[in-house]
């Protein structure tokens, strides 16, 4: 009888372990639901640890390799990345123009790319 109780206890412990493990996995996945894509709210800076914190602003004009964000002009660094809020690539010619008002997140380079944008996310209107 003692062996059956031990076996049942081990079986119950295993079931409890599976339930707790499943719950922990579900909470982890649920907590990471939106982390594979940029947030929809441009006021929340994205985390690119290698780039540091994002700056935010409004893109109002773009011409050639220069963009104007909050009345300040910035050059786009060579080979820089522009993407939309879903992580899809955007070409600089796709944002060319005047009188626009797109919220953006951007990262400025350092060293040879100082004061140049090295990555930018554009939040287009829906």
Image (cartoon, helix red, strand yellow):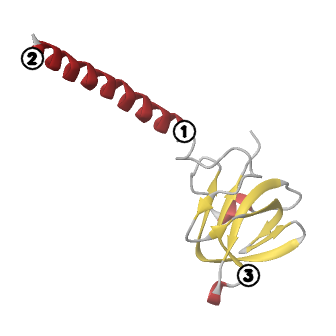
Question: In the picture, residue 120 is in which quadrant?
Answer: bottom right
User: Tag 3: Cα neighbours inside 10 Å, few (<14), some, or many (≥20)?
Assistant: some
Name the spot of residue 96 as percent of width and height, x first.
75, 63
The residue nearer to you, when weighing 6 against 111, is: 6
User: Tag 1: Cα neighbours inside 10 Å, few (<14), some, or many (≥20)?
Assistant: few
Residue where numbered disc 1 is placed: 31
| Mark in the foreground, 2 or 1 | 2
User: Tag 2: Cα neighbours inside 10 Å, few (<14), some, or many (≥20)?
Assistant: few
Q: Residue at the spot x=63%, y=89% of the render? A: 112
Q: Residue at the spot x=36%, y=32% of the render? A: 21
State left or right for residue 34 relative to residue 15.
right
Name the spot of residue 19 as percent of width and height, x first.
36, 24
Residue where numbered disc 2 is placed: 3
Give the spatial CA distance, label 1 vs label 3: 35 Å
| Mark in the foreground, 2 or 3 | 2
Give the spatial CA distance, label 2 vs label 1: 42 Å
The C terminus, quarter of image:
top right
Question: In the picture, residue 61 is in which quadrant?
Answer: bottom right
State left or right for residue 103 relative to residue 120.
right
Up-down relation of residue 109 to residue 42 (above or below): below
Query: Which residue appears farthest toward the top when viewing the image?
Result: 1
Residue where numbered disc 3 is placed: 115
Kind of element beneath mark 3:
loop
Give the spatial CA distance, label 2 vs label 3: 73 Å
The N terminus, quarter of image:
top left
The residue nearer to you, when weighing 72 against 43, is: 43
Q: Are marks 2 and 1 in contact (CB under 8 Å)?
A: no
């Amino acid at each position: 009888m003692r062996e059956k109780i031990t076996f049942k206890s081990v079986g119950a412990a295993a079931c409890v372990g599976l339930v707790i493990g499943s719950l922990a996995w579900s909470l982890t996945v649920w907590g990471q639901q939106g982390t594979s894509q940029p947030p929809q709210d441009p006021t929340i800076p994205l985390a690119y640890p290698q780039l540091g914190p994002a700056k935010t602003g409004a893109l109002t004009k773009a011409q050639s390799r220069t963009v104007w964000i909050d009345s300040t002009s910035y050059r786009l660094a060579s080979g820089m990345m522009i993407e939309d809020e879903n992580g899809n690539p955007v070409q600089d010619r796709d944002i060319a123009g005047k009188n626009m008002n797109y919220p953006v997140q951007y990262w400025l380079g350092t060293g040879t790319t100082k004061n140049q944008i090295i990555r930018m996310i554009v939040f287009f209107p829906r």
